Amino acid sequence: MKTKISLMMLLLAAWLLVGCEGQNEPTTEGGGSVESTNIASVNKKINYYGTVYEVIMKDGNRMYFAIKNDKEVRMGCWSYFYDGCEDEYDTYAPYEYKGHLVIPEKITLEGKEYLVTELYKMACTSHSDFVHPNTTLLSVVIPKTIKEMRVSCFSCCTALQSVKFEKGSPIKELTRCTFGGCSSLEEVILPENLSSIAHEVFESCTSLKTINLPETVTEIGYRAFIGCNSLEDINLENVKVVGEDVWGSSAFEGCTSLKTANLESAIKIHERTFSGCTSLKTVNLESAKKIYEHTFSGCTSLENVKLDNLEVLGREAFDSCTALQKVELPSIKYLGIDVEEDEEKIWWDGDAFVDCHALETLILGSSLIRTNEGKLFEGCENLKDVYCYAINPPMLDGWEEGASDNRVFIGDFVLHVPATSIEAYRETYWGKIYRFMEGSVDSYESVVGYRTIVAIEE
C-alpha cells in the first residue's frame, strides 16, 4: 500500500514539474487572436492617435491598439501610445511589456474583429534627449499580418534576446533603428523577402554574434551594424550597396570580432564601412567600382582584399592597415581621391595607404588616370615595389606643369612600368624621390634623389 502511495506521489510531482516548466516556456509561433479568456479589461480613449484601446491581460501585461481603418489596427506596447501625452515626454514613465510577446494576427474590440497590420514603438526612444528603455521584454514573434513597422519599433529594448518574423512575412525593409540599442539580442530570424536594412537598425546590438541575411537583401544602410562588437559572421554575398550618398556608411564600424566579409556583388561601398574592424582579415569586393574614404581605416589584421574591378579608391581607404602586405588594383582609375558619378568633379585628396607599415607591393592597372597630391605612401616604410601598367604617366591631382615639386610621392620604392614608357615616367614626379619633413613650410623637402624605374617583365 505504501509503495502504491509513494508511486502516485512521484507521478503527481513529475506532472506538476512538467506543467510548471511548460508555463515558463515562450511561445514561438504567432498568429491567432487575443483570447477573451485571457483579457482582464479593455479601456478606450480618443487622443492624438485616434481611437486607442488599452487591453490589459490577466498576467498583468498590456497591449495597445489604435484603429487604422474599419479592418485594421496598429499595435504598440508603450503606454504613451494610449495616454497621448504629447507635451509631457520628459516627465512620462511609460509602461513596459514583460516577458515573451507573441503579437496577435487579430484582435476583437467592441465586438468587431480587426487585423493587426502595423507595429508601433515598444519603448520610448526618441524625443529631444529623453530615452526610456524597455528592460523586461525578452522575446518577440511577429506574424505575417504585419505589413509595416514604425521607426525605432524595438529600439532600446535592452533585455530583448530573440526576434522571429514568421514565414510569409511581407516586410521588405527594416526601418531606421528597428532594433538599435538591443544590447541583449542574440537571435534574429528575418523576413524571407527582406530587401533592405535601413540605417542604425542593429546599432549597438553588442550580444549579436551571427545573423543570416535572406538572399533578397541588397542594401545595407548607414550605421546599420555599428558597434556590434560581438558580430562574427554575416552573409553579405548579395548586397550591392553599403551606406548612403548623404549619410555615408560606417555600416560595420567597430565590429571588432568580424573576421571575413564577402561582398562579392557590391558595387559601391561608402565611407568607414569597416573602420575599426580590428579582427577583419579577408575581404572580397571583386565587383566593387568605388570605395569611399576611410573604408578600412584601422583594420589592423587585414591581410587579403580582392578588388578586381575597383575604379575609384578614396582617401585614407586603407589608413593604418598594418598587416596588409600586397594590394592589386588592376582596374583602378583614380587612386586616393573621390570622384563624382560623372567623373567631372574630383575632390578629397588624401593618403590612401598611410601607415600601412607592412605594405611591400602595390600593383596598379593600365587604366590609372590620376592619383592624389599628398602623402600617398606616408608611413609605408617597407614598400619595395610599385607596378604601374599605364602607358602614359598618370596625372597628379592638383599638379600642373611648373608647379612646386615638393608635394608628391615619398619613399624609395622601385617603380615598374611598361618598357616603352620608362623615359616618360622619369620626366615626371613619378621619377623623383621626395622626403616628408615635419614642420617644414611645404611639409616636404626638395627632391632628394631619383627613383629606380625598371621595365615590367613580360
Image (cartoon, helix red, strand yellow):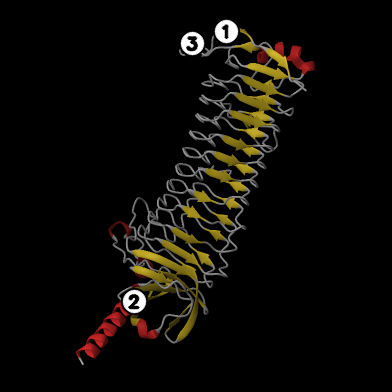
**Circle 1: element type:** loop
Disc number for residue 23: 2
Residue topped by disc 3: 440
Q: Earlier in the sequence, mark 2 or mark 1?
A: 2
Q: Is residue 24 something one can see in this rendering?
A: yes
Residue type for callout 2:
Gln
Element at badge 2? helix
In front here: 280 or 87? 280
Closer to the camera in the image, 16 or 308: 16
The part of the image, by quadrant, that contains residue 388 is: top right
Look at 75% across and 14% down and name the residue there. 422
Q: Residues within 10 Å of mark 2 (few under 14, many from 20)?
A: few
Q: Position of residue 173 (x, y in %)?
A: 56, 59
Mark 1 and mark 3: span between their CA atoms?
Answer: 11 Å
* Amino acid bearing label 3: Ser
Task: Rate crowding at label 3 as few (under 14), some (14 to 19) or many (20 or more) other CA atoms within 10 Å.
Answer: few
Query: Measured along the vertical axis of the image, is residue 133 above or below residue 108?
Result: above
Type of the residue with mark 1: Ser
Q: Residues within 10 Å of mark 1 (few under 14, many from 20)?
A: some
Which is more foreground, mark 2 or mark 1? 2
Residue at 51%, 50% (x, y): give it. 233
The quarter of the image holding the C terminus is top right
Residue 426 appears at what percent x and percent y?
A: 71, 11
Q: Secondary structure at mark 3?
A: loop
Residue 399 point in image, percent of width and height: 65, 18
Quote the CA–CA distance across marks 2 and 1: 80 Å
Sequence-earlier tag: 1 or 3: 3
Check disc 1 and report the residue beneath it.
446
Q: Foreground mark, 2 or 3?
A: 2
Looking at marks 2 and 3 on the same chain, the residue that comes earlier in the sequence is marked by 2
Instruction: Give above or below for 27 relative to 220.
Output: below
Residue found at x 22% / y 89%: 5
